[in-house]
């Protein structure tokens, strides 16, 4: 079930490392959801809608032999993981989840797929 995120107040924010594209930097105060505890993404690396990755999957299907069943399994895997949650998900995290799903169901290397992500 998806959470209706509600950020904590300024006094309750927690100090955590600021992460951008997998690299940690100095500490910054981060708000968190008072309902589920998820820490809010404060970076400029905003997530994309799932349609962006479905379009990439379509291009991958043209270049590599991926069946309809494999494509559907990949999409279901992404939907299960709260892929589009704009509160805590980053674009980098989405890429990692997408590549992990591709590797799980298609056995494709990241080097073969990464040029299609940008």
Image: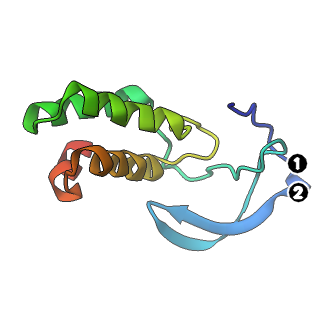
User: Farthest residue in the front direction?
Assistant: 69
> Residue 1, located in which quarter of the rendered image?
top right
Question: What residue appears at the point 44 percent right and 46 percent down from the top-left corner?
Answer: 94
Q: Is residue 80 left or right of 55 when viewed as pictured? A: right
Question: What residue appears at the point 39 percent right and 53 percent down from the top-left corner?
Answer: 96
Query: Can the viewer see residue 116?
Result: yes
- Structural crowding at the residue carrying mark 1, measured as other residues with C-alpha within 10 Å and reported as few (<14), some (14–19) or many (≥20): few
Q: Is residue 43 or residue 89 the one in the foreground?
A: 89
Question: What residue appears at the point 53 percent right and 71 percent down from the top-left corner?
Answer: 24
Query: Can the viewer see residue 48?
Result: no
- Structural crowding at the residue carrying mark 2, measured as other residues with C-alpha within 10 Å and reported as few (<14), some (14–19) or many (≥20): few
> How many angstroms separate mark 2 from mark 1 (CA)?
5 Å
**Coloring scheme used:** rainbow
Q: Quadrant of the C terminus?
A: top left
Q: Are marks 2 and 1 in contact (CB under 8 Å)?
A: yes
Q: Find disc 1 in the rendering and name its residue.
A: 9
> Residue 54, located in which quarter of the rendered image?
top left
> Residue 68, located in which quarter of the rendered image?
top left
Residue 99 percent location from the top left of the image: 32, 50
Q: Is residue 37 left or right of 54 when viewed as pictured? A: right
Q: Find disc 2 in the rendering and name its residue.
A: 12
Q: Is residue 105 left or right of 34 when viewed as pictured? A: left
Q: Is residue 108 or residue 87 the one in the foreground?
A: 108
Q: Is residue 79 or residue 19 the one in the foreground?
A: 79
Question: What residue appears at the point 18 percent right and 30 percent down from the top-left corner?
Answer: 67
Residue 52 percent location from the top left of the image: 35, 30
| 111 versus 95 height, above or below | below
Residue 117 percent location from the top left of the image: 26, 44
């Amino acid at each position: 079930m998806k959470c209706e995120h509600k950020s904590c107040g300024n006094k309750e924010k927690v100090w955590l490392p600021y992460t951008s594209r997998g690299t940690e930097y100095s500490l910054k105060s981060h708000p968190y959801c008072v309902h589920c505890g998820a820490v809010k993404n404060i970076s400029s690396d905003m997530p994309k809608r799932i349609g962006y990755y479905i379009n990439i999957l379509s291009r991958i299907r043209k270049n590599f032999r991926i069946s309809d069943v494999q494509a559907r399994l990949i999409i279901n895997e992404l939907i299960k993981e709260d892929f589009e949650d704009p509160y805590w998900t980053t674009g980098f995290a989405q890429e990692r989840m997408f590549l992990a799903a591709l590797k799980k169901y298609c056995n494709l290397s990241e080097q073969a797929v990464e040029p299609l992500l940008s």
